[in-house]
Amino acid sequence: MRPGRVGRVGVIGHPVAKTAVVAKAVTPGPAPVAKAAVVGAAVTPGRRRRRI
Amino acid sequence: MTQTSLDRLGPVDYAVVEFPAGASSFTGEMTNELVALVESGIIRLIDVMILTKDDDGSIEAIELSDVPELGKLEALEAELAELLAADDVVHLAAAMDPGSTAGVLIWENLWAAPFASAARRSGGQLIADGRIPIQAIIASIEADELVTEGV
């Protein structure tokens, strides 16, 4: 680490918590590919989710 | 480096990409994509560090300039602003698992800068921002499905 980084005021401010790993969140279940497709469809432009 | 006016500064984000022990497979693909983002003017790379966390939790921070044979990253390295402080390294490494290596990236979202400037000139103030995790979208969709199925 460069000396210039030591003793300076930081920009992060607090310890960072680990986020859930996306690959692991999508992988479980019988049809991970289908689940990923559903997520993709949900964020497709012009596509609105409706409750039946 | 070209000095960036505060008025025209875009939102600055960071990411910590962890590579668990033995799981990394560097083919240059990440470098190519990063260089493409910079060259297309979508982002400006502000700082990059490589962190390693030993099994005992001790942290080592490596500057990008200390990496031999940077290849395409060499030009980007010359433009870095060295924003992160030593305290930031400790804070960011808190998210890492022991035995892992992580790349830390800080970047300015150049694509958002004109809109952010326009919003400021219009009297707008940024009062909240954030990222929606994919997991939250999945959970939301699954909750909808449960309602639809009447569970």
Image: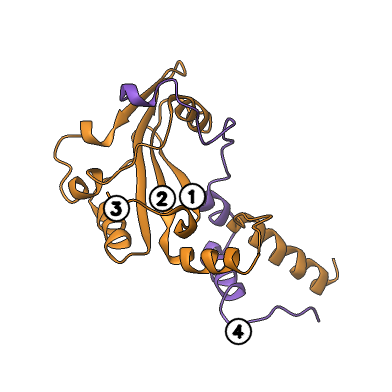
Chain colours: A purple, B orange
Q: Which residue is mark 2?
A: B107
Q: Amino acid at mark 4?
A: Gly
Q: Mark 3 vs mark 1: tell me if same chain.
A: yes
Q: Residue B1's x, y, as percent?
A: 27, 49
Q: Nearer the viewer, mark 4 or mark 1?
A: 1
Q: Nearer the viewer, mark 2 or mark 4?
A: 2
Q: Which residue is mark 1?
A: B13
Q: Which residue is mark 3?
A: B2
Q: Which residue is mark 4?
A: A46
Q: Amino acid at mark 2?
A: Trp
Distance of label 2 from label 3 (alpha carbons): 15 Å
**Would you say residue B23 is visible in this rendering?**
no
Query: Does the residue at mark 1 contact the one at mark 2 (Cβ under 8 Å)?
Result: yes
What is the secondary structure assignment of the residue under circle 1?
A: strand
**Would you say residue A42 is visible in this rendering?**
yes
Q: Earlier in the sequence, mark 3 or mark 1?
A: 3
Q: Earlier in the sequence, mark 1 or mark 2?
A: 1
Residue farthest to the right, as pictured: B150
Distance of label 4 from label 1 (alpha carbons): 27 Å
Distance of label 2 from label 4 (alpha carbons): 29 Å
